[in-house]
Image (tube, rainbow, N blue to C red):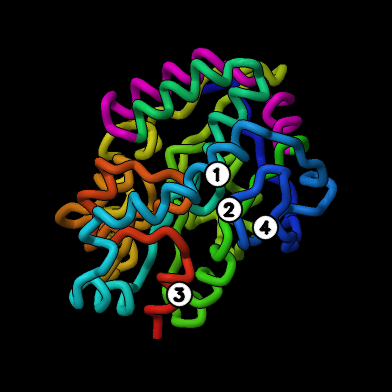
Amino acid sequence: MAGLINLHAGPSHSLSLHQSSSVRPPSASQTTVRFTTPLFQSTRLCQTRHLVAAALEISKESSSAGLANRQPSKGVIETWRSADAVCFDVDSTVCLDEGIDELADFCGAGQAVAEWTAKAMTGTVPFEEALAARLSLIKPSLSQVEECLQKRPPRISPGMVNLIKKLKANNTEVFLVSGGFRQMIKPVASDLGIPPENIIANQLLFGTSGEYAGFDPTEPTSRSGGKALAVQQIRQEHGYKNIVMVGDGATDLEARQPGGADIFICYAGVQLREAVAAKADWVVFDFEELIGELP
């Protein structure tokens, strides 16, 4: 694709911990990881997400009561403890927000794009259809992506930093497998100590003047079933025996199939998608649950 350029993430950005407040809080009595280097200094008020987070906290106990897989089987625990690699979804899992929704809102197409995101995450439409539709609504320029990252910094989910540290201490490799965009994921991966080669995600393309020029359709996560393919590739390239997929959406659930992920852990700490959670091997609302089961 001659004449197209890609946005490359800048240098590593340090993380700091802040107590939750009325500014986009994840939940009560939890902490949020924010980027504090020049690229990620600003924060914003978001009353809607505050109300959604509060509602989720109130409903979490009653919602989880009906999930039989809140208590994992012995086999699931053994697979989790012996995993050679763990693949994490990024949006609403590693990070509190849906990156494409944040970008869309910043560009003035928030509501329409959020509707498509909901369809994609529940599996009611093919992911590739939802991705193309959302990007056709946003058409983000290079400068808009950069400004969005500056003004709306990614927020790491509570407990994620400690979970990744624990996995690394156990010599478990960590991958980010996402339907989001590399340009918005690379800074997150850098601060979590995840090498860029362990990112499998979509790539935005821009013209020589920085105008939106589409996305790379060859990335496996640009289509339905892509995460399963990505995990299969990871297994083949590294010879891993046990691989775990952690995420919140239908595309993450798809990764659990022969040759792909051995088990799927549904993280419902941000979004509880009941149709997805019902088919998971284990449903958790807090990453401390996963840390507690590691050796």
Tag shown at residue 53: 1
Question: What is the distance, in whole Å, between disc 1 and disc 3 at their CAs?
Answer: 23 Å
Quadrant housing residue 260: bottom left
Q: Amino acid at mark 2?
A: Ser
Which comes sooner in the sequence, label 3 or label 4? 4
| Residue bearing the label numbered 3 | 291
Quick one: 271 or 103, which is closer to the camera?
271
What kind of residue is marked 3?
Answer: Ile
Of marks 1 and 3, the one in the foreground: 1
How packed mark 4 is, by other alpha carbons closer than 10 Å (few <14, some 14-19, many 20 or more), is many
Q: Which residue is mark 4?
A: 33
Q: Is residue 202 left or right of residue 127?
A: right
Q: Is residue 130 above or below residue 29?
A: above
Determine the CA span between mark 1 and mark 2.
6 Å
**Upstream in the sequence, badge 1 or badge 3?**
1
Q: Mark 1 or mark 2: which comes first in sequence?
A: 2
- At 69% from the left and 55% from the top, the residue drawn is 20
Q: Is residue 228 visible?
A: no
Separation of marks 1 and 4 at Cα, in angstroms: 16 Å
Q: Give the Cα distance between marks 3 and 2.
A: 19 Å
